[in-house]
Amino acid sequence: MAASQKCLGKGSPAPGPVPKDHIRLYSMRFCPFAQRTRLVLNAKRIKHDIVNINLKNKPDWFLEKNPLGLVPTLETPSGQVIYESPITCEYLDEVYPEKKLLPSDPFERAQQKMLLEHFSKVTPYFYKIPVGKTKGEDVSAFEAELKEKLAQFNETLVNKKTKFFGGDSITMIDYMMLTNFSNTVGLTCTPQLKKWTEHMLEDPAVQATMFSTDTYKVFYKSYMEGTPDYDYGL
Ligand code: GSH
């Protein structure tokens, strides 16, 4: 089940058919969007296999499955293809109904999706800040904007008075928002968000899909240098 295979690039033979009782995830080990799908697969204990893709040099057979050329992409044994991380996660939650991660109440579900829209405005900063720093640029304005947005998430948790964004146990929105915020800016001004991060790190699905801080550092260094080491640590 673990993502342990070396990535496949252009010219690699296409993997065989998806086994009958499995679902397949096309992934990249360090992709935060693919991690969402990996979290849901793990949390719901869904039988799956993982094919890692060399995103710098994508195989033609992968582009035929997902013309956007993005991971995560799911494939079922009958050849159905599903992509875009929130769509893959919702699909899995619907098709594998045990341990539902999305709330059954339509308003609560809508609230989670709205929160995800807010979070999606934040994700570019996780790229802009480290890239700017690598280039020696002044990123203080980006950092201030990110801090302001994180303060809003902190406020959401304060108002809800719950451990997680959907209540006192982990639900879909927590997996969608999983990020190591503290890598980008400190969390001293957002104590509830800091606690949320700590609770998240206790979750078995989170532990099963995360690498060590040092491993991420090495990967991101290679990524910033333009030669991402997708197989680092294998
Ligand atoms: N909106 C997509 C989602 O939520 O699934 C974003 C996925 C995404 O950007 N994945 C990156 C990717 O596949 C890897 S982290 N990049 C390949 C490319 O841009 O060509």
Image (spheres, rainbow, N blue to C red):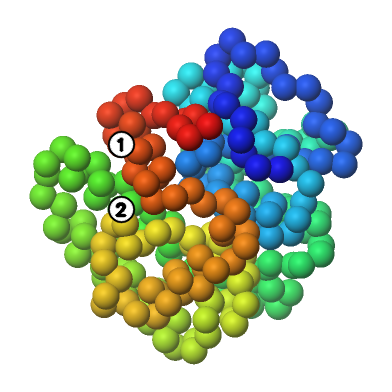
Q: Is mark 2 on a helix, strand or loop?
A: helix
| Amino acid at pointer 2 | Tyr
Residue 106 sits in which quadrant? bottom right
On whether ligand 1 comes within 8 Å of the CB at mark 1, the answer is no
Residue 66 sits in which quadrant? top right
| Amino acid at pointer 1 | Lys
| Total number of numbered discs in the rendering | 2
Q: On the picture, is 115 further left or further right than 146?
A: right
Of 97 and 9, nearer the camera is 9
**Residue at the extreme top:** 11
**Picture coordinates of residue 190 (x, y %)?**
32, 77
Residue 146 sits in which quadrant? bottom left
Of 157 and 45, nearer the camera is 45
**Picture coordinates of residue 20 (x, y %)?**
88, 36
Q: What element carries label 1?
A: helix
The residue positioned 51% from the left and 25% from the top of the image is 54
User: Quadrant of the image for the N terminus?
Assistant: top right
Q: Residue 32 carries which label?
A: none
Of 148 and 184, nearer the camera is 184
The residue positioned 44% from the left and 23% from the top of the image is 56
Q: Name the residue under label 2.
A: 125
Mark 2 and mark 1: span between their CA atoms? Answer: 17 Å
Q: Mark 1 points at which residue?
A: 221
Quick check: can you spot residue 233?
Answer: yes
**Picture coordinates of residue 61 (x, y %)?**
65, 19
The residue positioned 42% from the left and 29% from the top of the image is 229
The residue positioned 40% from the left and 80% from the top of the image is 192
